[in-house]
Amino acid sequence: MTSVVAIPAALLQSIPQSEDYIRILPELVLSGFGIVIMLLEPLMDEQKSQKLLGLIAELGALAGIAATWIMSRSPGLAFSNMVKVDDFSIFFHYLVISIAAVIILISYEYMGVQRIRAGEYYALILLGTVGMALMSSAVELVLIFVALEISSISSYILAGFRRHEASSSESSLKYFLLGSFATAFFLYGVALMFGATGSTNIDIISQKLQAGPANLLVYVAVAFMFVGLGFKVAAAPFHIWTPDVYEGAPAPIVGFMSTAPKAAAFAVLLRVVFAINAPGRFWLIWVSAALSMTLGNVGALVQNNVKRLLAYSSIAHAGYLLVAFAMLTPQDSTNGVSAAMFYTAAYAAMNVGAFAVVSHFANAGERYVTLEDYQGLGRTSPLLAAALTIFLLSLIGIPMTGGFFAKFYVFSAALKANLVWLAIIGFLNSAIGAYYYLRIIVMMYMRESRRDVPVTPVPLGLGIALASTVVVTLYLGILPNGVLQFTRQSAREIVQQPVAPPSAANGVLLAPF
Amino acid sequence: MNADGWSPYILSLVTFAPLTGALLLILFPRRDRDIRIFSLVIALLTFVLSLHLPVYFHRGLAGFQYQIDKSWISSPNIHYHMAIDGISLWLVLLTTFLTPLCVLISWKSVHDRVKEFFIILLILETALIGVFTSLDLFLFYFFWEATLIPMALLIGMFGHERRVYAAIKFFLYTMIASVFMLVAVLWLYANTGSFDFVVIRDRITAGAVPGFPAAAQWLFLGFFLAFAVKVPLFPFHTWLPDAHVEAPTAGSVLLAGVLLKMGTYGMLRFNLGLFPEAARRNAPWIMVLALIGIIYGALVALVQPNMKKLIAYSSISHLGFVVLGIFSFTQAGLNGAMFVMLAHGVSTGALFMLAGLLHDRRHTYEISEFGGLATTMPVYAATFLFIVLASVGLPLLNGFVGEFLVLSGAFQANAWYGVLGATGVIWSAGYLLWMYQRVFYGKVTHEVNNSLPDLSGFERLAVWPCAAAALVMGVAPILWLGAIDPAVQAALAPIPQVISKVVGQ
């Protein structure tokens, strides 16, 4: 409680300056475009609206990327220390907005084929992206919660967009019910954290925790927040919803859900875990990582539906990623954060690419999504099959693809941190994982098509989406240096360096003011 | 080191020429004839380029030549480090020699998805050459894994009835094994900060790697397991007969001719080069496994009703000789091991081609389906006999030199190893000559065999170079051994006990 005299000063300070708006410029731009689409939609002819609105959405995403560039020129805190623009948030801004841009490209064709009304679909993608972008730059737990909700609610609706399909509604409802439950956990954790430390600001929490031994409340708070975020990233044992939701939701949206909100949730988790140096996290993460890898891979082995298979694979990949979170010392943590960031980028490229192929191939009503349907694709559509092969090889972790270096950095960080068992579980799982990805390749190239599966030519939008994801996947596999340097640098900013005494840390934090 | 200006780049040129060809092929329209001719041109061009290597090779030198070492990725510290010595030189040549022949042998027999076939074949060639030329462990691991996919695709897309089963078995078997190698490589990187073979070897020799003595045995096993599956050493051999029987001819030729040598090359380069102490400690049981492989492979080959399976099991037996030679730690043994690798590549490659030609005509590999072919296909029969004799180890042909050297090395190590190994020579004469007798001599038992056409021009072009090479290698082995010997001597240098033994003679 501030005194009466201090109020004007505090108010003055809390009035947002132009700098503050620049620091959330991407969010503003994306929201603007989203609202424009919502407004235009009822005014337009249903038949014609689809193309134009898609184009506007694509422009919006590209403008968001440009806005991120502008944002990146003025790093610092904004809105009373609630938003922080640093290399870490810039990285995730670029990542989630690029994912959205590619997903819109993929949807462009998909919407027409599935005969889905366009308007709010594109708007929801853009608005959801606002939430995800904000999640990565928010350093205030309540704001993180709000951003999480923005992102989740749009995902819930997007999951149910194949309205005439019962499975899609089921998917949406399931996602909504379980998702709200999980978010409640997160909120409870935030409340407990506030109770324990008296603040919801990550920097202040971190200082408080640094100052003395943590009490029991903090441990419970960390565990609750982990449950909430664990649900969002589909980590075991909070993964049960994933296969059903992914199976029912529209394929491009699954590509979106399995990468962008996940990346954002991982960003939050990275901040929560490493910036506040969350106590008692080690076994929590260790067990969850080991379980996710194992359950995801074993579950994927028996799947016959490609969307379900990729759902289990995404659980497994969440597990590999979590390995990077189990680091304790600052040196190891820096490696871990940097590896995790690289992993999210590589995973986004290969998984969005894979879903691009799946959503094109699924055709009207998503009729062709079983493994048998992929028989002979190598013959009927060589380029599509080749692209999918590259993504699958990357998911396996074959060298020269982004997936290899992603796994490589995570596991070498784990080995450096002496997490030998976790690394061994990871290696074994990678070997298991190779089998089910290979099954798809085998279907495409080594079997002859039995059913009459129509193969339509690849439209321009999808072609651009595929080409860009292939290029990024290979780029991360052949020249990972640039991205890695960037993630290293951001990791060093995120991770608490213990050598600096609290006062120095204060100085750094307040430096922009 | 080399006088000419090409030398730093020639290895990269040779390695990536086929890949460039494959990428260009993607742009080609689906006109099968053009695609075949273009692939042949690329494969021949690669061969001609690779001839640069032995011509300008400094034979007296033991170290690496044609070196190129550029930083590629700063973190992890990965270099684009390529170079060859007398060991890898000939394996590169073997690859570039066999690939054009593979193109020729597939000219008529592959008529479905021709474009894909040749793209995959050329990519495979790049990966194979890369395995032998790269000295950075990461680069090596990449090429090592990169051979898997095209080979599995060759088997799975262009093979026979049970091709998918064989392809998956091949892929999983070898991939899971190489994960262990990856762990060992990562351990070495974590403790030396380098992937460079030479740097790591020097650090280890200087005793500057923390925790190395304790870990050496595990590291040795990590590498060894990956290589042993590839060789394949008994009891890791079960993937090989399936892969061979189902693979298309060109796949079999490269599989037996080059792919298996990746395993023995790896043992020679990495197991001996990086862990000489552990290698010596483990040599006894490895040599026993090699002996079991020699005898078991030969015995199983003896009873095979399927010609291709017979040749596949004979490979297990022959590769046993290579492992026996390597782990004898004698100059003669290692020279012999190298020579068997090359000789086996040439003659077994040719045997697979010949078997494939028969399959093109009759769509079967069953020995009982044939008989009396010598009368209907005289040229084919004569060529076959020549190759069989080379494979059996007739003096003045290539098989003899290598086996002789290996056995003399094995005798020096332990007389029993030599004696048991020598029985392998007898067995191989048994199964190959018996097979030859059943297929070519006697009366024509099946009516269809009367009208089989003899070797066509194309087919002669594919098989006869192998026969010629087998003869030259047998008559003038010194052309090859001259380069091999110093490199082998260098490989043996860190194994002290053996040096004294060699000197003591």
Image: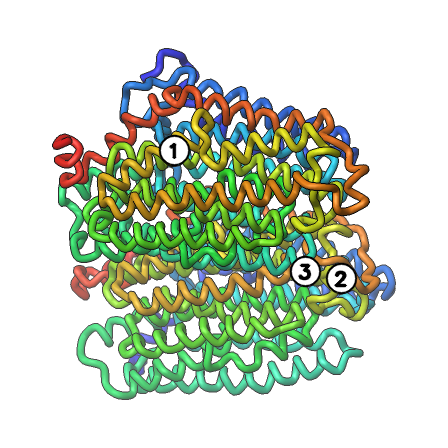
What is the crowding at mark 2: few (fewer than 14 residues within 10 Å), some, or many (at least 20)?
many
Q: Which residue is mark 2?
A: A110
Q: Are marks 3 and 1 in contact (CB under 8 Å)?
A: no
Q: Residue A464 placed where, x, y %?
A: 68, 48
Near-viewer residue (A439 or A106)? A439
**What residue sits 39% from the left and 36% below the top?**
B134
Q: Chain of mark 3?
A: A
Q: Residue A434 placed where, x, y %?
A: 52, 61
Identified by mark 3, the residue type is Met
Locate residue A408: give its quadrant: bottom left
Q: Quadrant of the N terminus of chain B?
A: top left
Q: Nearer the viewer, mark 3 or mark 1?
A: 1
Q: Is residue B433 at least partly visible in the picture?
A: yes
Seen in the image, is B55 located left or right of residue A470?
left
Q: Nearer the viewer, mark 2 or mark 1?
A: 1
Q: Residue A306 placed where, x, y %?
A: 65, 68
The residues bearing labels 2 and 3 have C-alpha atoms spaced at a distance of: 24 Å
What is the crowding at mark 1: few (fewer than 14 residues within 10 Å), some, or many (at least 20)?
many
Near-viewer residue (A235 or B461)? B461
Residue furthest to the front? B442
**What residue sits 60% from the left and 77% below the top?**
A243
**SS state under label 1:** helix
- Mark 2 or mark 3, which has the lower sequence index? 2
Q: Which residue is mark 3?
A: A443
**SS state under label 2:** helix
Q: Which residue is mark 1?
A: B402
The residues bearing labels 3 and 1 have C-alpha atoms spaced at a distance of: 43 Å
Seen in the image, is A355 located left or right of residue B201?
right
Q: Chain of mark 1?
A: B
Q: Chain of mark 2?
A: A
Identified by mark 1, the residue type is Gly
